[in-house]
Amino acid sequence: MLQAGAVGGISVLLPSRTAPRSGMRAGSGGRLDPAAIRKYAARLPIPPVMPQDPRDAHTDLDFYTIGVRQFRQQVLPPGSPATTVWGYGSARHPGTFHYPAFTIEAKVDRPVRVRWVNELLDAEGRYLPHLLPVDPTLHWANPPGGRLGRDSRPEFTSTPGPYTGPVPIVTHLHGGLNTEESDGYPEAWYLPDARDVPASYARTGSFYDKFRIKAEALSDARWGPGDAVFQYANEGRASTLWYHDHCLGITRLNVYAGLAGFYLMRGGPSDVEGDALPGPAPRMGDPPGARYYEIPVVIQDRSFHADGSLLYPASRARFDGFKGPYIPASDIPPIWNPEFFGDTMLANGRTWPVLPVEPRRYRFRFLNGCNSRTLILKVVADPLARRPASPALTLWQIGSDGGFLQAPVELGQLLVAPAERVDVVVDFTGLPTGAELYLINEGPDDPFQGGRVGADFSPADPKTTGQVMKFVVRPLTAPDRSTPPSQLTLPSFKPLGGAFRARRLSLNEADSLRLPGVGPRVTLLGTVESVGRPDPLGWDAPVTENPTLESTEIWELWNFTVDAHPIHVHEVQFQVVDRRRFGELPRPPEVWERGFKDTVLVYPKAITRVKVRFSHAGQYVWHCHMLEHEDNEMMRPFTVSPR
């Protein structure tokens, strides 16, 4: 297992509401060579704050109407073609649509209500097909199946091409503690309110009406065609959350197209008050050119066609060279790829950006928004140095998924699996004007399996995916009143109490049943039998995890595969107990994992134990956050029952 040793403003191409009805773009000119893309030619975009709807003076709520639209944005360096993407934005403020989305600022214990609107329409009100190839042979939302065949794995008499119909969405607030109707359940999706949706299509998922009826009974907000209204109580601790699409079977594509944004919870007894931490962060009404010392950064990998359009594999052959036979002549999906690793790194929606910094402390809220890639981040002086590179600056981790740690942790690198967040202070104090430093990635260009870079796996390509962004030191403009991280006092928290029961759960992959040596065809979760054998289960198998409300349980995650998987449990914040390889003694969690988390890296051929408290009744999901895995069965429902 890896031992990660100790050691203003935004520029966008404004979206066009009349984006072309282009659908899946084959792209022109073939694949864009990542080595030909200029690095550090544009500044890091810093997402502004999402504007609210007008407040209701009689209600203690923050209101938003947030749509999903298609538009063009300058993702590649200036002078390169713009890229058609999807993004969230305030439906009342057209200029706010961006990839990644503007940040929702929330306060602990002050509810937020969002009307999420599917606006994937052209100027004439017709639906827009997906930008990327949708594999219709998976167990997915399947609108063409109608009400009886939705949320299923359809059958075909010949190998189908990509689905080109209207696109379903449903948004999940990752890391929140909310009720089932506001969770973004994968089968609670809905299509845009387009005028040309075929009459035979299902317009909503299997759980949409159930949750609509429940939500409308609890509030005065009515759901309408093409939207859903979710209310977030904002219980819990000050923390870094994020929102993204979670539709059954196409999450990987909807997120890849751009549907993600930060949701920052502030205030309450679990926050740090005053000037102890670097700030400010973006605020509503900031003037152009405002300086920020707290910056959220989502890191993602993408690939592009030469015309600037997003490239995502349209065939399973891209993954392993297997060219068929596909479904129905075999059991291998024709388009789905078991993992995806882009060849170009993006930070906040820009390829290899640069951030001017002052010789002072900065707070970075890093999110790994990649589909499959695990990151190992360092700040170094030479981006092409031999890996493993020597860190040029210490990284002080102060928080994880669920808020602040008990004390700052001094590190030379950050191990960040997909969907994990790390809250970090980086001190540039004392660096001379003009100094240049680089944020690099030493994680592999393949599925992460644990171990040490250079010894157990090859690092990412130092010329492309091994670089993320650049820092250039500029003169100090204002005194730094923040506290040195070694002297920071962070809010304390109470560990979870004793567990009511333990569950043994399995992580599995399955190869073809009809073609020996071809695989994986599917990734699965399941249970573990008493003799230590896995019992893999599909998404639609009966629920096997059914904790009681307000109970605390130990979930033992047995990984029977060769890869490490980031496992996410919805609507909880858990604590990592320990890990052990099969047949060995347990060891404690890493020092940076000893706070609250909602996503944990589960190493191969090993057992990871987490302690979970369930505070909301309802039906939710737990799944692998490698999105290609999640979309092909590595997701299971669980129910929390009243006492």
Image: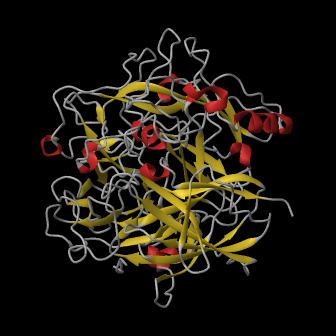
**In the picture provided, is 475 more to the left or to the right than 384?**
right
Q: Nearer the viewer, residue 155 or 439?
A: 155
Q: Residue at x 32, y 57 (%)?
A: 516
Quarter of the figure with residue 13: top left
Pick the residue in front: 119 or 42: 119
* Residue nearer the viewer, 532 or 387: 532
Location of residue 439 (image quadrant):
bottom left
Q: Report x, y in % for residue 105.
A: 59, 46
Q: Residue furthest bottom?
A: 585
Instruction: Report whether 333 appears left or right of 285.
Output: left
Q: In this rendered view, identify the residue nearer to me: 346 or 397.
A: 346
* In this rendering, position of residue 575 left or right of residue 552: left
Q: Residue furthest top?
A: 124
Q: What is the x, y in percent for residue 78?
A: 22, 32
Q: Position of residue 446 (x, y in %)?
A: 28, 60
In the picture shown, does residue 50 fall above or below 240? above
Residue occupying image coordinates x 67% and y 22%: 225
- With respect to residue 411, does 51 lie above or below? above
Residue 566 position, x and y percent, is 47, 63
Q: Quadrant of residue 415?
A: bottom left
Q: Looking at the image, can residue 353 be seen?
A: no
Residue 68 seen in this snapshot: yes
